[in-house]
Image (spheres, rainbow, N blue to C red):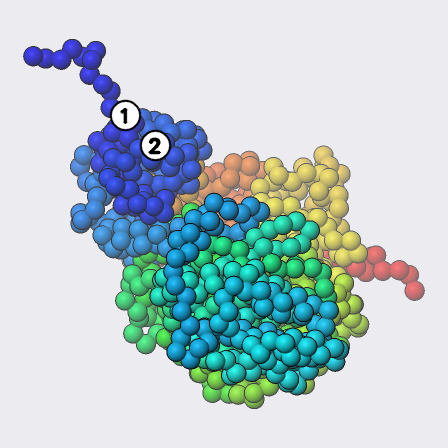
Amino acid sequence: MSVPSSTVKAPTRSQRLLNTEVFDAEYYAAECGRDFESKQIAARHFVQYGMKSGLSFHPLFDLGMFPAHVRDRYKAGDVEFLLTYLRSPESREHSWSWLFDPSRLTEPGSEGSVLLSRYRPNKERLLPVPNNLPGTTPTWPEVRSLLISHAQMSKAYELGKKPLRLSAWSETAENEWLESVDDVPVVPPASGMLVSIIMPAWNREAAVADAIESVRQQTLESWELIVVDDGSTDGTRDVVKSFASVDGRIRLVEADHLGVCAARNRGIEECRGEFVAFLDSDNTWRPDFLRNMCAGLAASGGKAAYSAVRMLNAREEYTGQPITADQLLVRNYVDLNVLVAKTSLVRELGGFDPSLRRWVDYDLVLRITKTTGIEYFPFIGCDYVDDQNEDRITRRESGNWEYAVLGKNVQDRFFPDGLTQPLNSPSLSVIMRVTDKVELAIKNVSRIQETAGSGLSEFVVLDELQGFRPSMRLRAALAGIPGLKYIKLPRRYTEAIAYNIGSAHAAGPLLLFTKESVEIREGTLTKLIGQLEDPAVVAAQPLLTDPAGIVVSAGAVGRSNSLAIPLFQGLNVADARRHSGRGIDELATSAFVVRADSFEHLGRFNPIFAGEAAVTDFLRRLNASAAGEFVVETSALAVDHSADEFGERPPLAAADAEWLSPPVEPARSVEAHYRDVDLEVVGFTSPRHPDLQPVVPVLARRSTRTGSEPSLRWAIKIGADFTIGGDRWGDVPYAADLAEALTARGQEVVVDRAMAFSRPSNHLDDVVVVIRGLHSCRPQPGKTNILWAISRPDMITREELLGFDVVFGASRVWCDYVQNHWGIEARYLPQATNPRRFRPHLGAGQEPLYGLSFVGGPRKPIGRKIVADCLKLGQTVNVWGPRWDRFIPPHMVVADFVDNNDLSRVYSSSRVVLNDHFEDMARWGFANNRLYDAVASGARVISDAVDGIDEIFKGAVQTYTSAAELNAILNDPSRFPDDAEMASISRIIRDEHNFDIRAGILLKAALEHRQSTRPAS
């Protein structure tokens, strides 16, 4: 009998999810940090709680990569919306995670399906990874196993972080535990002594009596108390002697003042008990403490245990909770006053480390956990007076000792997760800390991996991210890096601790220490490795800049009464590159390469430092060892995205200053280094924190002349930013060619990118030349300010031009308008080419390699108009430029980039070069630079119509305004000049429109302006 449809229950949300087979219960359990009895229970938990928390149901699903409206509906628990969206075309327009890009799936039947259902456990499938995934494509089973394992570890670390102190105490739980051990017999050993108690004391006359009395009140009688007096100068010894005279279990051991560790170790030597306990001279035990501890250990058979403590301060708090060995790697939860351990175990471990002045209990606890567990017994055993007594070690000694203890004990506790096989004999190990910026870390790892070369370098990545999701995202993104050694750490340690952990797993003979914010540019690693091939060089760094391209460090130079001064900080890269990079006293802490054997020989980084001073300290020790010299490879470049040369240099952590090794005598003076780049140090300014920041040199330019003309300092400002993408802008070679031409005329030239227009060292400049394109630049007061408009005229306003002393424009139409309508003199100065780079390359009779060619990036919505027009006419176009696969057939894309040094050969080897302009450039008569370069290379060009083209290029550039005109040009080569005339036109462009001529015009204009504004003598 059929069941009426009205009585059939609709599937629940969890069942709907399970029916699609996208739910990975094992992975979801790892994200939750818990176990589920069945897949059904896991799915119900996901829709009720997991979605609200943003947890993922599949290793290849990262909610953070979905649009905001999807994230909102997901967290509202809308399963039906989620499944509908995953089937939609819209979902195919973005990646679902760093390992899953649905647009890369080309299998039939993909449309309208929930694609993740194909990626189930134990199913071999290729992963459709995004194009920008670093490295190679891992397999699905490998990825699933890796991400489940990483999720389990990360979630365990996250859930394991517990508060050190509790505001409430459960007497119920305490009573239940006490009842469980109430009948456990506590039998002294054959030696007759069960517990030895060690109490160090130094000038504790007023407090020690209460501590001793709390021991005498213990219900367990099989104990001895060894009070080790650490050279007291008050009446402490007399107080102890008075107790010893009436209780034979109490002994006084008198010692010199060598510190608490030495005192406790002396007590350990005197111990006769099976167990040892520790009580400070200003704390007290509750009467049943020893009996309960011994009963608990007898019941469990354990070797060490601790109880809870009641803290007596402004408010009542408690310490004590079940803790694992891994949780103790984050912080210390075990109070020494309530720790009881086998005496033999403590002796085997060597007792307390006398080199430590604080956190010695934490050190012992960590060493115990390397050999055995420490049990927790949930009862209050001690009352701890947490007062503000300045004589306490916790207030007298530096908190940095915690880092020293951690650094000593965690070195061998962490290991790479091991997805990929280690590289064979890498030349370099890149050790990178990742603490905050995941996307930047992925980008920078990818950049190094792409440019370093196969097998050249291995990565050791130290994941210190504090959030679960960022850590999962980073691990997924780096899953394809060959030979990656990925180490997940449970907390954010210090530079010293993290780097030391990473170095223990590095296989390369050279080590590069860096952080996620540092972008290593192409060629940098090869150049640094090359420097270290010289046995006289022990360490090297690249030239380090901030994101604007302003120098952060070209090494550092020592100076008396100051921290080492970063060389050329605040200057342009070109300034630093005039320096040899030698005679350096210290290197940048954020990116440097050192020999692995030198690093090990010096004992690695000293872990007592809280911050980057650990690196400074190591470099000072390395320099003092005379193992070799430091070198700055100024042709190698690294960009620190966390640096900001417009702000004040961050001070050294005050707690670190006292631990720094002394600097060596400077190899050369600061003044001598700056003279090498034609700058004078005329003074120094004191920083806000003189002990924690270096002094800042005040600079002036050295006056020079070249023949009859003064050598001025020119700052050329261009719109490209200081990124890899910015390097590909036409502004960059344009400015470089102009700078070369000005330099040939005896001028000193630097080029500032978009974010560096207000460079801190602007005061050194004499002339500012703004190559006006996409970005405006404010004139610099007191300088000769020149604007050369070559592009985007609609963006230029009269108000902008009023601030400049001289205005040039690459269009007669625009110059006339500015003169006649705005009342500002604007001189016509067309764009130019560099004939040393752009010249004909095809010999007589040689056939072009390409037909129609276009070089440049696409613009929405059609790519580029001239390319689209040619395609509509059935033409094939050879294209060089990024992101063109969205607009033209892939086979037409020759490459996503062509170097400017190779560009002339492309032009010269093309039958016709295609060109177009921004609409405002065409309207205002601005002929772009591509025309000059292409014709200088001997190429024929088709372009959109721009006023003045015929006058300049004399037929070598044919223009069109309609598809019919374009078609006519394409089908009638005779419209162009013949080969002989083309050669003549090309020669004219190279001779009359080159940067040498333009530089002469600009120099003349600058000198005339400076002469006109000079005060009369």
Three-letter code, disc 1 = Thr
Lateral position of residue 138 relative to residue 277, left or right: left
- Residue 587 vs 545, above or below: the answer is below
Lateral position of residue 186 relative to residue 550, left or right: left
* Image spot of residue 585 (x, y percent): 62, 80
For the point 24% across and 20% down, the residue is 10
Tell me the quadrant of the picture where the C terminus can be found.
bottom right
Is the residue under label 1 in contact with that under label 2 (CB below 8 Å)?
Answer: yes
* Image spot of residue 528 (x, y percent): 47, 75
Q: How many marks?
A: 2
* Image spot of residue 398 (x, y percent): 65, 69
Residue wearing tag 1: 12
Three-letter code, disc 2 = Val
For the point 20% across and 16% down, the residue is 8
Q: Is mark 2 on a helix, strand or loop?
A: helix
- Residue 826 vs 667, above or below: the answer is above
Tell which residue pokes out farthest to the front in this image.
246
Between 189 and 534, which is closer to the camera in this rendering?
189
Between 845 and 1, which is closer to the camera in this rendering?
1
* Image spot of residue 494 (x, y percent): 54, 65
Residue wearing tag 2: 47
- Residue 660 vs 171, above or below: the answer is below
For the point 21% across and 31% down, the residue is 19
Q: Residues within 10 Å of mark 2 (few under 14, many from 20)?
A: many
Q: Earlier in the sequence, mark 2 or mark 1?
A: 1
Q: What element carries label 1?
A: loop
